[in-house]
Amino acid sequence: MTPGVTQPGATLREMTWRDIPALTALEPVLFADDAWSGQTWWAELAERPRRRYVVGERDGAVVGYAGIDCGGEVADVMTIAVAPPMRGQGLGSTLMGWLVSQARHVGAEYLMLEVRADNTAAQRLYAAAGFSQLTVRRKYYQPGDVDALILRMPLRDLSDDSTQDVTT
Ligand SMILES: CC(C)(COP(=O)(O)OP(=O)(O)OC[C@H]1O[C@@H](n2cnc3c(N)ncnc32)[C@H](O)[C@@H]1OP(=O)(O)O)[C@@H](O)C(=O)NCCC(=O)NCCS
């Protein structure tokens, strides 16, 4: 992965096991209802070869991260998050750009994700990135009976599809 510098000055780099303490400290802040444990992060990094994770780092601190599962026609966003003090400065969009570039790099045709129906900030980020809603999983998130919106972004320019019918 080529490291890059984002608008707020956070550098993207590959996530490593050394980041796990920082990640487990951030998770309950960022995902109050379903924070990943240190054990989950260990498994993600050590036992899931299809997955790739990146962190945004500023002044030596992890201030955001994102991950993707790549394994065929469809790539799935595993996570994307930005620490509260860094929000609204473009880091989320930069992380999304990284996810899209990874999915394209492995030749995926679609990038998919699920988002809570009450997470309007994330939904606006995804809409701006080019995702549209595919379906809804009712009352998916518990507790609270919150629906999950399943979003999808096409990665291939459908106008280039040589299998499409051509009317002469
Ligand atoms: C969603 C999240 C990653 C956005 O990160 P961010 O760094 O603030 O995003 P950006 O600054 O790049 O903003 C990108 C777009 O997202 C939308 N957005 C971001 N924060 C928003 C807010 N509080 N309200 C409404 N829209 C918001 C806007 O459309 C924004 O574009 P704009 O600035 O041109 O209006 C961040 O809010 C977050 O980490 N939330 C908690 C974790 C989470 O919910 N992750 C997603 C799980 S599905």
Image (cartoon, helix red, strand yellow):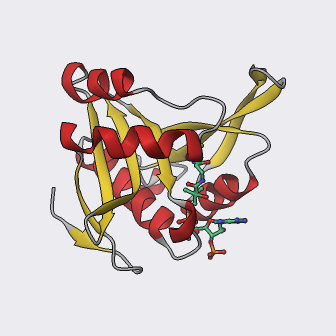
Q: How far across and down, in percent of the image, does residue 16 sit?
A: 19, 42
Name the residue at 25% across, 22% down.
48
- Depth check: 21 or 145 in front? 21
- Depth check: 134 or 126 in front? 126
Judge whether 92 appears above or below 152 on screen. Answer: below
Q: Quadrant of residue 17?
A: top left
Judge whether 53 appears above or below 3 on screen. Answer: above
- Give the quarter of the figure containing the N terminus: bottom left
- Depth check: 47 or 40 in front? 40
Query: How many numbered callouts?
Result: 0
- Residue 90 visible somewhere in the drawing: yes
Ligand 1 occupies quarter: bottom right
* Relative to 111, 55 lies left or right: left
Name the residue at 55% across, 49% down.
167
Q: Quadrant of residue 60?
A: bottom left
Q: How far across and down, in percent of the image, does residue 129 sit?
A: 55, 61
Name the residue at 57% across, 62% down.
84
Q: How far across and down, in percent of the image, does residue 53 sit?
A: 29, 43
The single residue placed furthest to the right in the displayed view is 145
- Residue 164 visible somewhere in the drawing: no
Name the residue at 32% across, 62% down.
61
Q: How far across and down, in percent of the image, does residue 72 sit?
A: 31, 27
* Relative to 42, 154 lies left or right: right
